[in-house]
Amino acid sequence: MITDWLKKNGYLIEKEDNQLGKKITLTTEKGQAVGITHSLQTSISGASYYRIEYDKTGQEFVLQNLSEILKSQHSE
């Protein structure tokens, strides 16, 4: 629900990654400005994936917008 809201509002973007062969979610400049970043990680099995990370500012941003996020979920 939170990820969907962040995508709809331009903080995250979903795109096809040809190297990984799957859809990935990355942060936008707008997302990075509020403390949400992404980094390329490798799992124990050797698979690469992008991890979305929320620093303290990013966590506070989500909490400040939680009522809006919940409202948007109920209106769908």
Image (tube, rainbow, N blue to C red):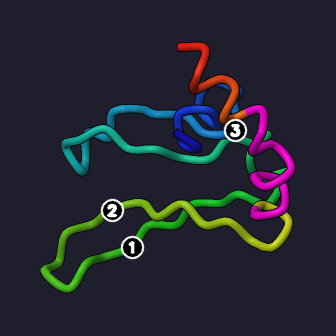
Between residues 17 and 71, which one lies in front from this camera angle? 71
Q: Type of residue at label 3?
A: Tyr
Image spot of residue 66 (x, y percent)? 75, 45
Q: Which residue is mark 2?
A: 49
Above or below residue 38? Residue 17 is above
Residue range corresponding to the magenta coloring? 59-68
User: Which numbered mark, 3 or 2, is in the foreground of this view?
Assistant: 3
Using the numbered discs, state the Cα–Cα distance from disc 3 to disc 1 in whole angstroms: 20 Å
Residue on which disc 1 sits: 41
Asked if residue 64 is positioned above or below residue 12 in the image, the reply reads: below
Q: Secondary structure at mark 1?
A: strand
Three-letter residue code for mark 2: Tyr
Where residue 63 appears, as percent x and y from the top left, is 79, 55
- Marking on residue 11: 3
Front-most of 18 and 65? 65
Q: Residue at x 13, y 80 (%)?
A: 45
Q: 1 above or below 71?
A: below
